[in-house]
Amino acid sequence: MEKEPIFENVHYLPIVLFVALPTTFIVTYVIAVLLGHVEAGFPYISDAATYAPESCIFAQFINMTAALMCFVIYIRYSQIKECNSVYKLNESLPKWNRMALIMGMISTIGLSIVANFQETSVVVVHLIGAFMCFGGGTAYFWTQAMCSYYLHPLGCSIRIAHLRLALSIFCTVCFFIILITGMLAHMAYNGTNPRKWYKEDGGWELHVVSTVTEWICAVAFCVYILTFTDEFREIELKHPKVIYKSGRLTSSNEILNESQHSVIQIQTPPTIT
């Protein structure tokens, strides 16, 4: 008898991520502003999660979100793999699908690094994590856009494919704006605390462009994840299947048989002639 699906409503996962990420950003921002840790203007997302207690809240929820995002990325990978196996869509699709899996995992690891390594503690690691998150995420969007076109018309609508392509282009532009304006702003900065960046500190306009673009790009990331909702309605998850390695199992059976044979020999009483 076939087992029941372990989870049928898979389409709720992208919705949860779409709600959880912005909520985490906003909550930590509000706490940071109320405690005077950042200015209410336009801080970076991670600047609003630099000091305790908001840094603790941010790290905890982002870690859980990153784990869930890894799960969603793997589900998407398995969905495309299964769809291509059934419909034999394109020989290039598996390659793009594997690339998407790798880029997606890099992005989620970067997200976790950003949350756990604050800029004031380990700035180099924090920046590497940010680059992995936004750079890897943008690369993931491009690979998913390619997969979407290969899946059309059986596995994806052309409207969704076009939307993902547009979001990929938009996030690419945002990524370079964040990177370039952020570097130029820090080069022009003359203040003492970047978490409280004022106009007289220098580079303020570039700083605002960089931070606002980061927030917009983060929203675009969430929207992209939300586009998986309709396709996830068509799938369900079942219990994983565990397979024993034949060599190990054979050896175990041989040991068991030898043990049983020895027990039988010991328990057999001697014959009297």
Image (tube, rainbow, N blue to C red):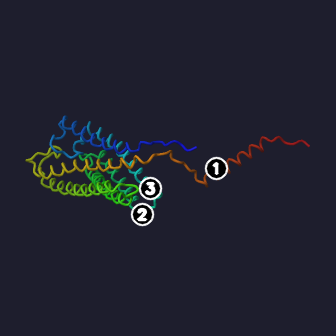
Left or right relative to 91: residue 206: left
Mark 3 to mark 2 CA distance (whole Å): 11 Å
What residue is shown at x 15% (from left), y 56% (from top)?
184
Residue 17: percent from the left, percent from the top?
A: 33, 44
If you read the primary sequence from the N terminus, does the residue marked by circle 3 or circle 2 appear first? 3
The 10 Å Cα crowd at callout 2, few under 14, some 14 to 19, many 20 or more, is: few
Residue 252, numbered circle: 1
SS of the residue under disc 1:
helix
What residue is shown at x 37% (from left), y 57% (from top)?
100
Identity, as a three-letter code, of the amino acid under mark 3 = Cys
Q: Quadrant of residue 131?
A: bottom left
Residue 90, numbered circle: 2
Q: Which residue is mark 3?
A: 83
Identity, as a three-letter code, of the amino acid under mark 2 = Asn
Judged from this view, the residue extending furthest toward the bottom is 91
Mark 2 to mark 1 CA distance (whole Å): 43 Å
Disc 1 versus disc 3: nearer the observer: 3
Q: Quadrant of the N terminus?
A: top right
What residue is shown at x 50% (from left), y 44% (from top)?
239
Residue 142: percent from the left, percent from the top?
A: 31, 58
Residue 205, numbered circle: none
If you read the primary sequence from the N terminus, does the residue marked by circle 1 or circle 3 appear first? 3
SS of the residue under disc 3:
helix
Disc 2 versus disc 1: nearer the observer: 2
Residue 102: percent from the left, percent from the top?
A: 38, 56
The 10 Å Cα crowd at callout 3, few under 14, some 14 to 19, many 20 or more, is: some
